[in-house]
Image (cartoon, rainbow, N blue to C red):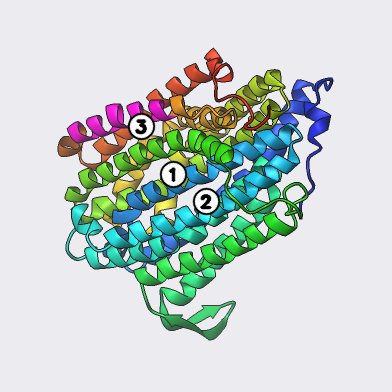
Amino acid sequence: MTKQIDWGRYLRPEASTTLWQQMGLVLRLSVPAILAEITAIAMQYIDAAMVGSLGAAATAAIGLVSSTTWLFGGVCISTAAGFSIQIAQLTGGGQKAEAQSVLRQGLMASLAFGVLMGALGAGISSGLPHWLRGEASVCPEASRYFLIYSCALPFSLLRQAAGSMLQCSGDMRTPSVLNILMCALDVVFNALLIFPTRTVTALGAAFVMPGAGLGVTGAALGTAAADAVTSLLMTGFLCFRSPVLHLVKGVPWRFEEKCLRSAARLALPMALERIATGGAYVAGTRIVAPLGTAAVAANSLAVTAEGFCYMPGYGIGSAATTLVGQSLGAERRDLCVHFACLSTALGMAVMALTGTLMFLSAPWMFSLLTPDPTIQALGVQVLRIEAFAEPLFAASIVAAGSLRGAGDTLVPSILNLASMWGVRISAAMLLAPRFGLPGVWAAMCGELCVRGILFLVRLLRGKWLQNKYAAAPDAS
């Protein structure tokens, strides 16, 4: 399924690479990840359109708890990153036996933490929509949606951990293909679970499409089922088919203090940052919820629509994490800087283009997501505000990925925390009462620009290569 990169060709001490070769490697790792991210957003578009056809209340039910799902998902991603960053640096340094040990510990820790987070989510699911100040008509559906999401978290975290480990070993294609498969499965499962049995006409022929008619609950079940299937496939490929990380005999399945300490050192700042930023998203939902069902629905759909713009940045950021981590493990700090700067420049260029396209195509995008003209008009307005922030948003995404590859997670977490709470939430609280949802998105636009500048300064100053985190765990 994948052709493994010959890292020695690029990273050995005597290797000399041109700027074009370095850019080619950035693109080689970025393109599969970008395609996977775009496909994931396409899935969200289809999901939103399916649920949106049920009415504004159904869209608002999912939108009400979406910020909390981002919070839980972000904390889970941080756990996976604590192990995958070690794998990037260890494989870059040729320490495959150590990487095998980290792989096993990462899978066990991810599964255990996923069960813990799932239990926590299930415990708060009944009261969460009411605490978020949702309207009474949407709270029951929102509660059921979040309960099902929480029950699927062990599978979700296992998929994220396995995919992240494959990416950090240099295999970007396999996680991308399997994530695309997950999107396709999600569409199929949703079509069967959201709508009742109905007659469908296609290519001039009519046929009966079976369906469970579960509405919002069906959307949650469809996504959970797709996640579970993909999780098993991703973990199976990692353990048995990966050219670098497939399981070998003689490496025990046990936790080691040194590995767990390194994982905690890397993951804890990221988890705290995710909690802080996720908490800011939840606070943002509490600011938007009193503006009414239309505002909640438009806000949720605008976030989905914007995904086509910023998900390429996350794909390039994943490539940057791998490239910087592998280079650092091979003790090629010069390449760390080159790959970080090239990746960030590429991300800003791509998202400047997608931001322009988003501004121009906003009416068409919202016409696909909802038939409600009020939600369409409000969504187009806020989406066009956000378009101006996309280049600097890219800088923060890709620079953060580069810093993460070097193990620099503490300072970026502090920058995100200061930006989200110091700029976005405070500005949104001031602007929402006067300007409504456009005021909230204006605050978001300003905050993303501030965040991008902060990350560019951090990246260009270069101190992230001189701190105690920029060393491959267990390398000595």
Q: Disc 3 to disc 2, how far (Cα)? A: 37 Å
How many other residues sit within 10 Å of disc 1, few (<14), some (14-19) or many (≥20)? many
- The mark found on residue 235 in the picture is none
The tag earlier along the polypeptide, 3 or 1, is: 1
Which residue bears the numbered disc 1?
Answer: 306
The tag earlier along the polypeptide, 1 or 2, is: 2
| Residue 255 visible in this rendered orientation of the protein | yes
Q: Quadrant of residue 276?
A: top left
The residue at the point 41 percent across, 76 percent down is: 195
Q: Position of residue 379 (x, y in %)?
A: 33, 47
The residue at the point 44 percent across, 62 percent down is: 47
Which residue bears the numbered disc 3?
Answer: 445
Q: Amino acid at mark 2?
A: Ala
State the extent of the magenta-drawn residues as a range: 413-430
Quadrant in which the C terminus appears: top right
The tag earlier along the polypeptide, 3 or 2, is: 2
